[in-house]
Amino acid sequence: MVKIPKHNYRPTCLAIRSYLFVLVVASCGTNALAQCSFTNYPLWFDPEIFPEFPGGYDGNNYRNQDEALTAAKRAAFGPTGAYPSYSVAYVCKGYYISMNLSLAAGGGAGEFPYDGGVMRLADLATNQSLLVFSVRRGFCGRDANGNLSIVSTRDFVYTQTQVLSCSEQRSLQLGLSGLSEIRPAGTGGTSTISLIAKVTSGNSSAPGTAISFSVDVAPNSGGHDHDVNRPKGSLSATQGVTDANGEVKLTFQAPTISGTHTIKANCNTCSNPVASKEIQVKVPNLVEMLPDTAKPATYTLVGATGNHKSNHWFAPNARDTLVSVVDTMFKTGWGAVGVNDGSLVWGGLFDIKGGWTPSHQEHRMGTEVDLSVTNPRNVTDAQKKKTYAELCKKNNSAFSIQTLWHQDDGYPEHFHVYLDGTGLNSPAQGGPCCARYKTTRAKVDKNGDPVLDRNGKPVQENVALCEETSPR
């Protein structure tokens, strides 16, 4: 044990054992690998002063030399880790004037006395250190007035034979090739990213080290204000062993849903057992459509829900086009246009009902918008046709868009506008606009011949078609 000794205090010599001692211990609420330990006997913390081990110390295991030395000073001198200042009276009773602790590196020259012998640093391994006491003793006498005073001092060092052994320091580093931002799957661009977990020992690689991997996604990230059963991205491997370069390589595949993902690498034999890397899955550079403060307003923002509180995000050019679109609609007599769903703040899958399924088949990249015919007011059929015709003019120089009017096709009626001029790519739609409705028609095979049932009658099928003339 380490106690505050007087000048005549000599602890009993204990056998010295030299070995590496590695143990997983709790520190400040987290698990950490013990890199250093006192190999002959542990520090002793007075339970009256320390009801619990201070700072997570268990009395023997420490993450590094600095932590071990700090613990030794606290065990010896109390919570401050500093030797107290004593009065002349106490010094004359045998208390030291000063005392400090240090670690002397093993494997070199030097020796330190203890009760019963001498500890030589040359007898210790290079990964070991000796705990050394440096003290100043005072010698007292009486002055001319008969008062006690310190007349001389003497400095000396000794050891209580406590040897600190430290295991090899291994540092886990998790590196990413490329940026820490990728696009959601299905939105074009890159939706996979390569990762490299590297383990080093000093300046050298550490092959043969086992590493495990996990991935999680931050709640309420990416524009989703719901989290039950939220899908996550996937890793190509959940565990591996470092190669000759001390590396394990794997890839992260983004989901269709935007959000902040954290990749963790775990190494149970490393000094820092967990390394993490944050990856943002997002469509970059989307901007928000803000409320129209003009009087009268040309549009109003609608459609926000508890699942998605912010639903009006667009590519910059698309937002500018949308401003022109609603201005044109307003001028036809529509009134303030109800701008419904665009994209979420980081794009990706827009699941209207919050079930992580594509209730919106599109709306993923900030290039589309739904315009309401019922909110903030019900628009007349005549006004819908007039506005639709204006949006579909081939010579309209204000913008280049495509408009899909969900007129009578099983969806709630609205205008779905492709703000980048792409999206209506079906031959049946045949142009920049489509007023779609449901109907039945005779089913044909790939050669264009009618499909017949067992009775030789033509099979009918339900289809959604575009009006080839004026909308209904």
Image (tube, helix red, strand yellow):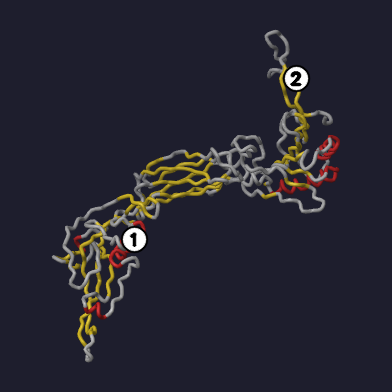
Q: Quadrant of residue 8?
A: bottom left
Number of other residues with Cα within 10 Å of mark 1, as a class: few under 14, some 14 to 19, many 20 or more: some
Q: Is residue 64 above or below residue 466?
A: below
Of labels 1 and 2, earlier in sequence is 1
Horizontal relation, residue 365 to residue 127: left or right: right
Q: Amino acid at mark 2?
A: Arg
298 or 416: nearer the viewer: 298
Q: Is residue 199 visible in the rendered structure shown here?
A: yes
171 or 296: nearer the viewer: 296
Q: Residue at x 62, y 48 (%)?
A: 284
Q: Which dot marks residue 91?
A: none
Q: Secondary structure at mark 1?
A: helix
Q: Secondary structure at mark 2?
A: strand
Q: Residue at x 24, y 66 (%)?
A: 3
253 or 79: nearer the viewer: 79
Give the image location of residue 361, x and y in percent: 65, 35
Horizontal relation, residue 26 to residue 104: left or right: right
- Quarter of the image that includes the C terminus: top right
Give the image location of residue 300, x and y in percent: 76, 47
Residue annotated with mark 1:
67
Q: Is residue 360 above or below residue 107?
A: above
Contact between marks 1 and 2 (CB within 8 A): the answer is: no
Q: Which dot marks residue 441?
A: 2
